[in-house]
Amino acid sequence: MSTVSTLPQRKITLLTLQAKKDRGEPITMLTAYDFPTARALDRAGVDSILVGDSLGMVVLGYDTTLPVTMEDMLHHARAVSRGAQIAHLVGDMPFMSYQTSVEDALLNAGRFLKDGGMNAVKLEGGREIVPAVRAIVAAGIPVVGHIGLTPQKVNQLGGFRTQGKSAAAARTLIEDAHALEEAGCHLLVLEAMPDRLAALITQRLSIPTIGIGAGPACGGQVLVTHDLLGMTDGFTPKFVKRYANLGEEMARAFGAYIDDVAAGRFPETAHSQPLDEDVFRALTREWEARIAR
Ligand code: KIV
């Protein structure tokens, strides 16, 4: 009997990611919120694409991730899933889509797979989200955990600051990491924490850790794509490495277009559609006859 797989042959799954970790190969993850970026990332060979709720800050113009809704996330998740065939796709559960009850968490996680085309969901938090994680995993939905700086708690944390600097805070994060692995998370994002704490957590877990501002010892790395491309204004966290300056390049291109249109240099003949000579003559004759009446 032959079996038919609905996944593309090279589709990256949670098994591929775990195998990478077991071989000691770093996992690559980047964010995307739209079709062309997802396509470019997939073609570049990134392992995993996160449709992050950073959407709110880098695309929708909010100061925090808190206003982002499930509808926002699903709209962008669908665009990303149309653009990426190979990468493992993770949908980020927005503020108040899982904190209200385990039932809400399960229903909203399911929407990311049913309506958003995602392969997994990500939730921020430690031991307090274990019941939600267990319920989502029990329904067959892979879960990515996220500890350290958890931006949905920005008001409680007093800003976007490094976490786990004291022994007590570090111990809490280590215990949270164990609890999330035990609850069934298949990846764990470690955001903005000292590198040696991230290394300790990474050593103690069997699942891969994915660092952002957590040093080089993690099982993989994630960045917000708009930060990496230089498309964000204002404060850039120390942990961001810029690989391009697309913000400046976009401003340069927009300025050149405005100058060209203003000076009559665009469009040129090469950008225009010619009209058939006979059609043109006929139209001219009709027009002349009309004004002669
Ligand atoms: O929303 C996001 O982009 C994230 C990453 C920073 C990990 O959660």
Image (cartoon, rainbow, N blue to C red):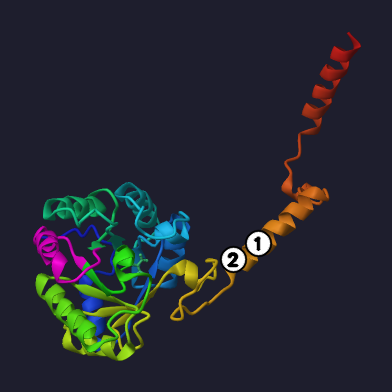
71 vs 138, nearest the viewer: 71
Find out whether the residues at labels 1 and 2 contact each other: C-beta distance under 8 Å: yes
Count neighbours of disc 1 (C-alpha within 10 A) and say few if under 14, some if 14 to 19, many if 20 or more.
few
117 with respect to 1 (left or right): right
The image position of residue 264, as x and y in percent, is 82, 48
- Residue type of the residue flagged with mark 1: Ala
Residue 88 visible to the viewer: no
- Of 33 and 4, the residue lying toward us: 33
Above-or-below relation of 30 to 33: below
The residue where tag 2 is placed is 247
Q: Position of residue 215 (x, y in %)?
A: 36, 86
Q: Is mark 1 within 8 Å of ligand 1?
A: no
Q: Quadrant of the C terminus?
A: top right
Residue 84 locus on image (x, y percent): 37, 61
* Residue bearing the label numbered 1: 251
SS for callout 1: helix
Q: CA distance from mark 1 to mark 2?
A: 6 Å
Q: Residue at x 41, y 57 (%)?
A: 56
Magenta stretch, residue numbers = 122-143
The x, y position of residue 133, in whole percent, is 14, 64
In this rendering, the answer to whether 227 lies above or below 275 is below
Q: Is residue 228 above or below residue 169?
A: above
Magenta highlight on residue 130? yes
Determine crowd level at label 2: few under 14, some 14-19, many 20+ residues with C-alpha closer than 10 A. Answer: some
- The quadrant of the image that shows the N terminus is bottom left
Instruction: Report the image quarter containing ligand 1.
Output: bottom left
Marker count (numbered): 2
- Image quadrant of residue 139? bottom left
Q: Farthest residue toward the right?
A: 292
- Badge 2 marks a residue whose secondary structure is helix
For residue 201, which quarter of the picture?
A: bottom left
